[in-house]
Amino acid sequence: MKAVIDRIEDGVAVLLFEEKGLFVNVPIALLPEDVKEGDWLHITWRVDKNTTRDMYRKNKDLLEKLIERNKPQK
């Protein structure tokens, strides 16, 4: 997937995904240091299944601890 940096305003790059006709605002801090208006970016999205699984487990454990802590005492 490709996008062009249409413009940069107040620390935000406006990317145009030409194939989809979509504009997306991205903080310039998330882009390579030397980008400028008119540069094309190759963009790849990838799901991090390991981190997703780990965070799911962590959140589930936290929820279970909260539920246990809030159970009425006998």
Image: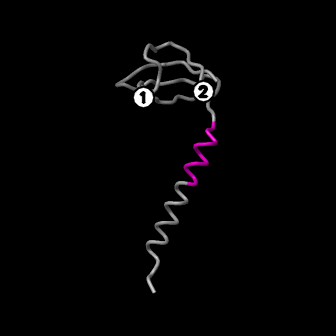
Q: Residue furthest front?
A: 74
User: Where is residue 13, by image quadrant?
Assistant: top left
> For this view, does 52 lie left or right of residue 37?
right
- Residue 17 in magenta stretch: no
Residue nearer the viewer, 25 or 58: 58
Instruction: State the colouring used for the structure image.
Output: one colour
Which quadrant is the N terminus positioned in? top right
| Residue 69 location (% of width, % of height) | 44, 72
Label 2 sits on residue: 21
Quarter of the image holding residue 48?
top right
Total numbered labels placed on residues in the image: 2
Q: Position of residue 34 (x, y in %)?
A: 44, 13
Asked whether disc 2 touches disc 1, contact meaning CB atoms under 8 Å apart, the reply is no
Q: Secondary structure at mark 1?
A: strand
Residue reaching furthest to the left:
10
Circle number at residue 27:
1
Measure the C-alpha gap from mark 2 to mark 1: 20 Å
For marks 2 and 1, the one nearer the N-term is 2
Q: Is residue 50 above or below residue 40?
A: below
Task: Please identify, in this view, whether the residue under mark 2 or under mark 1 is nearer the observer.
Answer: 1
Dot 2 surroundings within 10 Å: few (below 14), some, or many (20 or more)?
Answer: few
Question: Which residue shows up at 50% across the image and 12% down it?
Answer: 38
| Magenta region | 47-57
Amino acid on which the number 2 mark rests in the picture = Gly
Q: Residue at x 44, y 19 (%)?
A: 7
Say which residue appears at 49% left-offset and 60% top-offset.
62
- What percent of the width, then of the height, locates residue 27? 42, 28
